[in-house]
């Protein structure tokens, strides 16, 4: 049996540098940073007092949620995920029959990933519980703090009757979600799957990273300069938050509906380095990363020379050097033949579980319209990176350019990797 | 607060949870919260929390279980307010 081809027919985005598709596209074309300084982090004595938080207008909240839902909804990550999911569904031109008598959509489902979507909400609940007020928690703590809260909400809103669940693989989550949904459609088990990832922000999400000393603390007074992937002066990632969602659909179903097609997913692969070799809880086993990239390219059936652009994981840490080295080894290309490479995190910070989804949305915008988005703050490229690739491969400013194939990667704690290959449609 | 004022306040509290808004417009003391107003039973817990906050009372489980109609909700609130 032939495997189904899978295309993207809808997208929704809640990013620190732009909420909603039009604002986000404008932001990534103009190189708009969403990084700000937060007084609260200063007061709480964080080393890193900057971060990225999407700005959600009250009007958008009122349009997305009912009055009742708004009453007790406090989990920022859940809010970002749901807003992104609803925009994507709507963008795909999929209608919602809200009637209780309506037949569930047996061929449509969602695997929506998250990491720490409701830390603030959980914190309030802990305080009430310790204060002997467990009966005052209300009825929405569980649905807001469970990882499948986003998929459960969206499943009910759209009437999804196929798989409705959640995935988690730290900072690989968003990309992994796309891979899992892609595989489900490819295997013929569903026609439409909503993929996505989201994470909340603020001190209770970012504190653990601050304590690990992996966040940038050298640019608290110039937040927009702090996220500098591939730069010689990258000194830690800038924490972000947000949500991204993509409607994946079998090509057949998309053509049948006459849906708008952003592009095609021609491969996805996810693996782990097993925390062996150079791999640990927080560092990748290089062999695992390279293997993941190679497997994805093999599934895609493309030659490495055909890859026009790499949308890197590139977090603005020393890991960037290792990542570029892994790409270089996996592709086996000479310094000048290496594809162009850029990092969305230079504008958004690291949106954790949302990162892979938001970066994939940026990838499809670049594919469809034929441009390469800027990568901010790469004044001086790290010398170790230049040992593997030519300076001209590192994107700095906006470039108008037709691109046919993008490779997107994400990596996460637990030594987990994911790699996706996107292709322009029609080619 | 007299019973009419209390009723007006109660309607305000339960309004977001009510699925049949028309039934709320015409609600009498006999109107059932679940059957007529089509309130999701899981939300009765939230309504009780909102009433506790608005009236500064504490509704125990026994009272909560007896609260099936608008009239019963008013009876319980009035009783607890008097005890206060």
Image (cartoon, coloured by chain):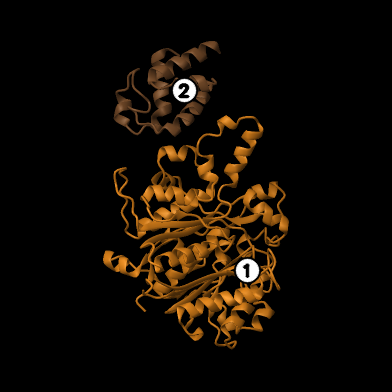
Chain colours: A orange, B brown
Q: Position of residue B68 (x, y in %)?
A: 40, 22
Dot 1 alpha-carbon crowd within 10 angstroms: few under 14, some 14 to 19, many 20 or more: many
Mark on residue A228?
Answer: 1
Q: Quadrant of the C terminus of chain A?
A: bottom left
Give the chain of mark 2.
B
Q: Which residue is mark 2?
A: B65
Asked if marks 2 and 1 touch (Cβ < 8 Å), the reply is: no
Most extreme residue toward the top is B82
Q: Against A1, is A9 above or below? A: above
Give the chain of mark 1.
A
Q: Quadrant of the N terminus of chain A?
A: bottom left
Residue A26 appearing in the image: yes
Dot 2 alpha-carbon crowd within 10 angstroms: few under 14, some 14 to 19, many 20 or more: few
Q: Position of residue A394 (x, y in %)?
A: 57, 78
Q: Position of residue A129 (x, y in %)?
A: 63, 34
Task: Name the residue nearer the viewer: B28 or A234.
Answer: B28
Side of A29 where A204 appears, left or right = right
Task: Name the residue nearer the viewer: A23 or A183.
Answer: A183
Between marks 2 and 1, how big is the CA–CA gap? 59 Å
Q: Against A136, is A222 above or below? A: below
Q: Position of residue A148 (x, y in %)?
A: 50, 50
Q: Identify the secondary structure beneath mark 1.
A: loop
């Amino acid at each position: 049996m032939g495997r189904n081809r899978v295309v993207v027919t809808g997208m929704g985005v809640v990013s620190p540098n732009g909420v909603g598709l039009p604002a986000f596209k404008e932001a990534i074309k103009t190189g708009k940073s969403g990084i700000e300084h937060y007084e609260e982090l200063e007061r709480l004595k964080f080393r890193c007092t900057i971060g990225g938080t999407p700005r959600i207008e009250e009007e958008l909240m009122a349009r997305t949620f009912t009055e009742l839902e708004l009453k007790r909804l406090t989990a920022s990550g859940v809010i970002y995920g749901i807003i992104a999911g609803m925009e994507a569904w709507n963008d795909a031109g999929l209608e919602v029959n809200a009637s209780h008598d309506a037949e569930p959509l047996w061929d449509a489902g969602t695997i929506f990933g998250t990491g720490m979507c409701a830390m603030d909400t959980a914190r309030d609940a802990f305080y009430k519980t310790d204060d002997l007020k467990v009966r005052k928690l209300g009825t929405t703590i569980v649905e807001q703090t469970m990882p499948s809260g986003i998929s459960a909400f969206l499943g009910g809103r759209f009437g999804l009757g196929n798989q409705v669940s959640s995935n988690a693989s730290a900072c690989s989550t968003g990309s992994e979600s796309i891979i899992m949904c892609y595989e489900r459609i490819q295997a013929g088990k569903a026609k439409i799957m909503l993929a996505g990832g989201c994470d909340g922000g603020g001190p209770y999400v970012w504190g653990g990273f601050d304590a690990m000393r992996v966040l940038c603390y050298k640019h608290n007074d110039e937040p927009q300069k702090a996220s500098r992937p591939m730069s010689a002066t990258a000194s830690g990632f800038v924490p972000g938050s947000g949500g991204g969602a993509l409607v994946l659909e079998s090509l057949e179903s998309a053509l049948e509906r006459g849906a708008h097609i952003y592009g095609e997913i021609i491969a996805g692969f996810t693996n782990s380095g097993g925390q062996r070799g150079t791999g640990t809880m927080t560092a990748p086993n290089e062999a695992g990363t390279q293997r993941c990239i190679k497997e994805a390219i093999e599934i895609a059936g493309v030659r490495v020379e055909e890859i026009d652009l790499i949308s890197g994981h590139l977090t603005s840490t020393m890991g960037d050097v290792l990542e570029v080295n892994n790409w270089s080894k996996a592709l086996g290309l000479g310094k000048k033949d290496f594809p162009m490479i850029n990092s969305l995190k230079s504008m958004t910070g690291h949106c954790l579980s949302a990162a892979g989804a938001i970066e994939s949305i940026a990838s499809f915008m670049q594919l469809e319209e034929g441009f390469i988005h800027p990568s901010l703050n790469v004044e001086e490229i790290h010398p170790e990176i230049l040992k593997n690739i030519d300076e001209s491969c590192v994107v700095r400013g906006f470039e108008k350019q037709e691109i046919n194939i993008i490779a997107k990667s994400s990596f996460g704690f637990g030594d987990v990797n994911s790699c996706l290959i996107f292709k322009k449609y029609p080619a | 607060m007299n019973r009419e004022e209390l009723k007006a306040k109660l309607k305000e509290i339960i309004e977001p949870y009510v699925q049949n808004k028309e039934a709320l417009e015409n609600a009498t003391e006999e109107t059932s919260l679940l059957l007529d107003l089509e309130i999701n039973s899981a939300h009765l817990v939230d309504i009780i929390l909102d009433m506790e906050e608005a009236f500064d009372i504490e509704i125990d489980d026994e009272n909560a279980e007896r609260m099936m109609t608008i009239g019963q909700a008013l009876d319980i609130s009035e009783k607890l307010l008097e005890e206060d």
